[in-house]
Image (cartoon, rainbow, N blue to C red):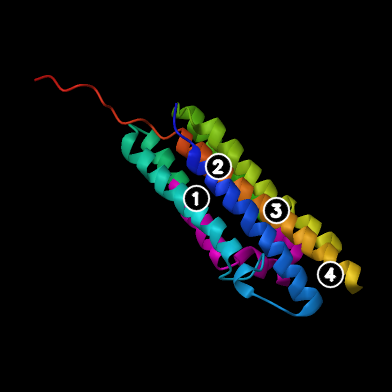
Amino acid sequence: MREAWWLFVLAAVAVLLYAVGLVVRLRCRLHEGCVRQFDLDSIGGLPRLFITGLFVGVAVVAWRARRRAEGQARTWWTAVSVIGVGLAALKVVSAHSDAKAHAGLATFVVGVALSAVALSVLWRAARRWDVDAGPSVVVALAVYAFAALGLDAITGLVAGIHGTAGVVADAVATFIEEFGEALGALLVLAVVWWWLPAVDRAPVRR
């Protein structure tokens, strides 16, 4: 059985980091005492970089799986690695948040459409090429897509609330959105790592 202690460490780090991020966001909004490095959705902040790092990990592990795989499964794992790189890049520059600020509904629709197409292609390719990891990895990516796009609707629902109560609601909604996204990214990393093909360790005859 694979050792998974590091997953629990990352989960604990996520809980601590995003709890601190919630406190910082509330303090920033209510008392203007901002520590931008810990704010939940600040570009360059630790919460955002945490998710970026998880997807860098996904890309690295998927690339290792690609090197260990055979046949067309190598192409499939290459696609997963590219998706990991793409999601890391999008997160670090806050592409989704920037697009949402200019066209919220269009960003949501395009995001859902692109996610559906990419996941469908991965699913069909995995079935055609007999990649055992396919269903699990696709489901994990779907969970992340829901966290990144679906939970974002919560922030939108409280965006029009004003006053102190609105500030608190906005902070909590952002916490739910970002923390859920972090857990989704961690799930993707865990599933990709779990399906990493084992190295052939057959004994060498002397």
The disc at residue 83 is 1
Camera-nearest residue between 87 and 10? 10
Picture coordinates of residue 13, whole percent (x, y): 57, 53
Residue beneath the point at 58% across and 68% down: 45
**Labelled pair 3, 1 in contact (Cβ < 8 Å):** no
Question: N-terminal of the two: label 4 or label 2?
Answer: 2
| Residue 59, above or below 39 | above
Q: Which residue is mark 4?
A: 167
Question: At label 4, which amino acid type do we have?
Answer: Val
Closer mark to the observer between disc 4 and disc 3: 4
The disc, 3 or 1, on the residue closer to the chain's N-terminal end is 1
Residue 144 point in image, percent of width and height: 63, 47
Decide: marks 1, 4 in contact (CB < 8 A)? no
Indicate the quadrant containing the C terminus: top left, top right, bottom left or bottom right: top left
Label 4 neighbour load within 10 Å: few <14, some 14-19, many 20+: some
Task: Estimate the x, y position of residue 77 in percent, counting from the top left.
Answer: 42, 40
